Amino acid sequence: MSVAGHTPFDRGQGSETQLPTVGDAQRETGTPYPTDSETEIDSDVYKADSEAPTLPMVSNADPPDSLLSMFPVVESESGSERESSHVVGAREVGYLRQELRSALERERVCVKELVQLRHSLEESLERERVYRSSMAEMQSLYRALSAECAYKTEAMGHLEREVTSLREAQKEVKGDS
């Protein structure tokens, strides 16, 4: 309803429109908010690898008053309670911490898998290097054996010709006698 060009959403005219928050969704679905113990973040969760930087610890303490003054008090959906938006924000921060912890855990698992894959690849490359080295040795040995076989084949041919000429000479000698 509008009166003389003003809407109920103008400042000072009724309640202002609030966008839904994670806290609102959790209240509607009945999902419990994370407790302090659930939102504490262990520093080792951040360590995906020994080279990975660690993130600073974040506490669940209430924000300082200077921040609280930035968030006005808003009415809850029921209208009977009043919560300051920093309380709702703190709940959202707890939820986001849980999500961050899950994401960091997934990242840690992925980094472990990448390290295993890297080691596997390095082993495969080492096996390939050994295989190529063995193949080079085998090819070198094959060439040497082929050369030796060719030499011996030629020598046998020469000996066969010698034997043949000696037999012919022997036949001639026997024929003359």
Image (cartoon, rainbow, N blue to C red):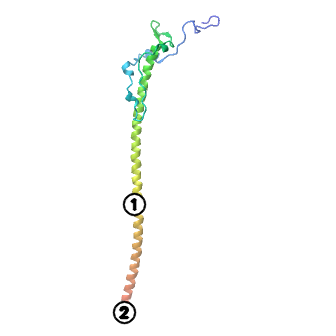
Q: Quadrant of residue 120?
A: top left
In this rendered view, identify the residue nearer to me: 52 or 163: 52
Name the quadrant of the N terminus: top right
The percent position of residue 24, horizontal first and vertical second, equals 46, 15
Q: Amino acid at mark 2?
A: Gly
Q: Residue furthest top?
A: 3
Q: What crowding class fits label 1: few (fewer than 14 Cα within 10 Å), some (14-19), or many (20 or more)?
A: few
Picture layout, residue 148 above or below residue 98: below
Picture layout, residue 124 above or below residue 175: above
User: Could you give the CA–CA distance between mark 1 and mark 2, rounded to whole angstroms?
Assistant: 54 Å
Residue at point 41%, 42% (across, down): 118
Name the quadrant of the C terminus: bottom left
Between tags 1 and 2, which lies in front?
1
In this view of the protein, can residue 108 be seen by the observer?
Answer: yes
**SS class, disc 2:** helix
Q: Amino acid at mark 1?
A: Met
The percent position of residue 43, horizontal first and vertical second, equals 38, 27
Residue under pointer 2: 175
Picture layout, residue 51 above or below residue 133: above
The percent position of residue 106, horizontal first and vertical second, equals 41, 31
In this rendered view, identify the residue nearer to me: 100 or 54: 54
Residue under pointer 1: 138
**SS class, disc 1:** helix
In this rendered view, identify the residue nearer to me: 23 or 165: 23
